[in-house]
Amino acid sequence: MRGRPTYAIKQGYEIQIDDTGYRPEPKFSGFPEELNNPYHLTGAIYPAYFSSTPPFKVPRFDIKAVTGDSTGSPAQTLRSRPPGQWNEFVITAQGNTFRVELNGKVVNEATDHNKAYVEGLIGLQNHFNGYRVQFRNLRLKKL
């Protein structure tokens, strides 16, 4: 998509790290701000919502979903620690299949049936201005 602005959603998957669902601009995704929404729990593969068909391929974790439906995979349980405490992630990506472990428990297993991103980048979430997100002991292992 050269010549156009790029967004992470056009280039890769995002694993959620914030349980609150806070966004300074809720219209960004069209998803309501609410606590304990499974698409906002830490470990969810964050959904993208579109009011019309986007000009790029999007993930489809629910094989029955159609364009405009959720493009994410919700976390199955709340496993994050309170703010100020470290969380431990183990994220495994093999092709279009993902497994997310959070603090020793599996919280998400999902397959992107659209195979939206066959290769790409690894990025770390910076969240919003005024919020601090820290990472430590990052390791990558090619399987």
Image (spheres, grey):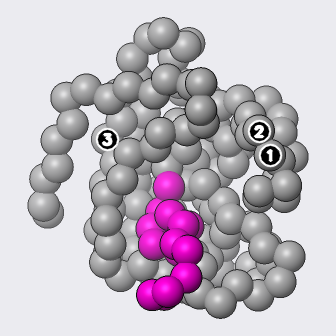
Q: Tag 2's secondary structure?
A: loop
* Mark 1 secondary-structure assignment: loop
| Magenta highlight range | 1-14
Q: Residue at x 19, y 29 (%)?
A: 137
Q: Is residue 124 above or below residue 142?
A: above
Q: State how far apart marks 2 and 3 are (Cα).
A: 29 Å
- The residue to which callout 3 is attached is 90
Query: Cβ–Cβ below 8 Å for labels 2 and 1?
Result: yes
Label 3: few (<14), some or many (≥20) within 10 Å? some
Instruction: Residue under label 2, please give it.
Output: 24
- Nearest the eye: 107 or 59: 59
Q: Quadrant of residue 88?
A: top left
Q: Residue at x 14, y 63 (%)?
A: 143
In percent of width and height, residue 92 lies at 31, 55
In the picture shown, does residue 129 fall above or below 140?
above
Q: Nearer the viewer, mark 1 or mark 3?
A: 1
Q: Farthest residue in the front direction?
A: 3
Tell me which corner region of the image, top left, top right, bottom left or bottom right, holds residue 64: bottom right
Residue 106 visible, this orientation: no
x, y percent for residue 111? 49, 70
Q: Earlier in the sequence, mark 2 or mark 3?
A: 2
Q: CA distance from mark 1 to mark 3?
A: 30 Å
Q: Amino acid at mark 3?
A: Val
Q: Amino acid at mark 2?
A: Pro
Earlier along the polypeptide chain: callout 1 or callout 3?
Answer: 1
What residue is shown with label 1? 25
- Total marks in image: 3
Residue 120: give its label. none
| Front-lying residue, 135 or 34 | 135
Q: Amino acid at mark 1?
A: Glu
